[in-house]
Image (spheres, rainbow, N blue to C red):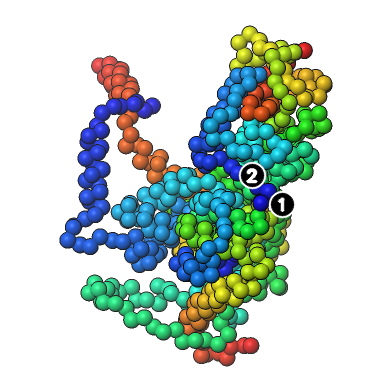
Amino acid sequence: MTTLAPTFQHPALGPQAVFRTLLDALARPGRPLSITGDVPGPPAPAAPALYAAALALIDFETPVWLDATLQPLAPTLRFHTGAPLVEDPANAAFALIGNPLAMPSLAAFAQGTAEHPDRSTTLLLQVTSFAPGPWRLTGPGIKAATSFGATGLASDFPTQWRTNHARFPQGVDLFLTAGHHLAGLPRTTWIEG
Amino acid sequence: MGVLARASAPELEALWRAHGAGAALAPLRPAETGLVMVRGRAGGTGQRFNLGEMTVTRCAVEGPGGVIGHGYVKGRDKRHAELAAAFDALLQDEARRPALLAAVIDPLAAAQAQRRATVAAKAATTKVEFFTLVRGE
Amino acid sequence: MYVAVKGGEAAIENAHDWLAEARRGERSVPELEVAQIKEQLKIACDRVMGEGSCYDPALAALAIKQARGDLVEAAFLLRAYRTTLPRFGYTEPVVTADMLAQRRVSATYKDLPGGQVLGPTFDYTHRLLDFKLLAEGEVPRPEPTPAASADGRLPPVTDILAREGLIQDEPPGDDSAPVGDLTREPLLFPADRDLRLQNLARGDEGFLLGLGYASQRGFGATHPFVGEIRMGDVTVAFVPEELGFPVDLGEIELTECQMVNQFQGSDTAPPQFTRGYGLVFGHAERRAMAMALVDRALRTNELGQDVTAPSQDQEFVLMHSDNVQATGFVEHLKLPHYVDFQGELSMLRSLRTAWQETKA
């Protein structure tokens, strides 16, 4: 058998549905959404939501950085997306992280420029699970405040995130994924706790 | 792969019936048409620039032993890309390779070389022979 | 300001039906096949591929048929079609020196390695209408006389000048640097040569020809020679990310023109010939030559010369070369401007009233 995992069954509708979910996730930070329908079986050790999001977002013009845990995805991603893989996280348009406990600091990724804040890295992190706490999230897309948390993130993540938030309009955006679920954390979101 | 890309789909179809039919192949990426941006160089040798796009069709199949056969061909003929991928997969099988090279690739390459030679010969008939001077060679 | 107007659906549908009927023309005449257009109106297809910026002769032929021979409309159709396709990537730069040349001529050297190869050219025809074609007589097909040791590869003429350092170098530059792409980012000024060449390669042939002609006549003084024109098949290779090595996709036909221009030298450059470069899809010699003239004119600044003519003015040339954009903006004047016009009318009436009052 080949080491390649499949992609979406439908080349247009599959990624469109996932893209829509990703947009919703950024519009409603900290609210876990599920990926359903045309979800391709991921190559180990990626979870379905991370893999589907990666296939929906990445193409040949978006350099990708993979952490050590997700290196086994390299042939599959190259084949389906044509994306170049980069060594330096600062050159990545997307970063796929299977083990957030060992990941580089958020500052190590592309932060965008004052003229092009959009040229920062978008990170896809695979966490163990989501929880309704202990963090308190506020910012655009959140009415008053929401409770959110994720297991499998480094303990200094909230501190790093506040530094990232302070770089606005620069800074990275983030998707947390767990199993079939994902949640968005755009750079505009403030985390307390 | 270049020889397969330059062949025509009917040529490959006939060769496939004779030499490939029955091979165990599984589709990996169905044939799809897209664009490739053609690049040139300023002055022929200088800085790169984007000249314009061309249509390209690609396909990938999985052959025996998990090998991946790739087809990348100019134009929009999906069957052409499928057959190119299929032959590419079989050509990676060391046991079948020599026979396929002899029966498929070599004759196609020879026919393509012949077509090139015909164009070159035709062009040569329009070469200006100056008679006021001896060509300095 | 445009107003959304509703209605007219039936009229539009009927107009389109009539268009289809008019496209078909007189029914007693056999319908044109796309393959006939592709094979017998090849130069038109080549122009549409160039201005449509999409190499696919069969699609260009289809676009010409659908557009009733309106080549600008056909280029528009091809541009619209390309937006529906995913892009797989970029080819390796084509090596025009390795071209299987059908034609290669030079105005600078009579005797040159490989010789002057005329190929299928209109040059030397007498421009007399051939009434045999009207009578639909088949042209006899000549058998090629095999020529000794012709592999079709001809060394570029500019190499001869380059060996003596008499012509401006074309250094390959930094191949790791990104290449500007008009289909991805908006055009900003000053535009680097990569973007200028991409713009010119898809520019309107008539516009480029007029500018090139003007530059010859004195509006942007160039004194060019055709160093070389070559036309023929070039191999295109592409590196799929999943393979990591170049794959030949086959051949495409290109026309290349190297213009050699007189140059006196300036504070920043020694006296030597300068270059203008044209490279276009298909057999499109006039287009390649015009592109080379305009490319040279647009290099005025980098050669330390003053911009004095429109053909040397980047914004003038590059912002107006694209016939799809140009036709869009010119033809948009047909759109309903009812509110604008009512505003102008009421303004004009009040101005007239005021004017009459001052005269009274």
Q: Going by the image, does B116 lie left or right of A79?
A: left
Residue to which mark 1 is pinned: C176
**As drawn, which residue projects farthest toward the left?**
C28
Near-viewer residue (C110 or A79): A79
Q: Amino acid at mark 2?
A: Ala
Q: Going by the image, does A144 lie left or right of C267?
A: left
Image quadrant in which the N terminus of chain B is located: bottom right
Residue located at (82% from left, 21% from top) = A155
Q: State the image coordinates of residue C284 (x, y, percent, origin top left).
A: 46, 64
Q: Is residue A170 above or below residue A70?
A: above
Q: State the image coordinates of residue B71 (x, y, percent, origin top left).
A: 56, 58
Give the tally of numbered discs. 2
Q: Amino acid at mark 1?
A: Ser
What secondary structure is marked by label 1?
loop
Residue located at (63% from left, 28% from top) = A180
Near-viewer residue (A161 or C211): A161
- Identify the image quadrant of residue C164: bottom right
Q: Going by the image, does C174 lie left or right of A17?
A: right
The image's mark for residue A5 is 2
Near-viewer residue (B80 or B123): B80
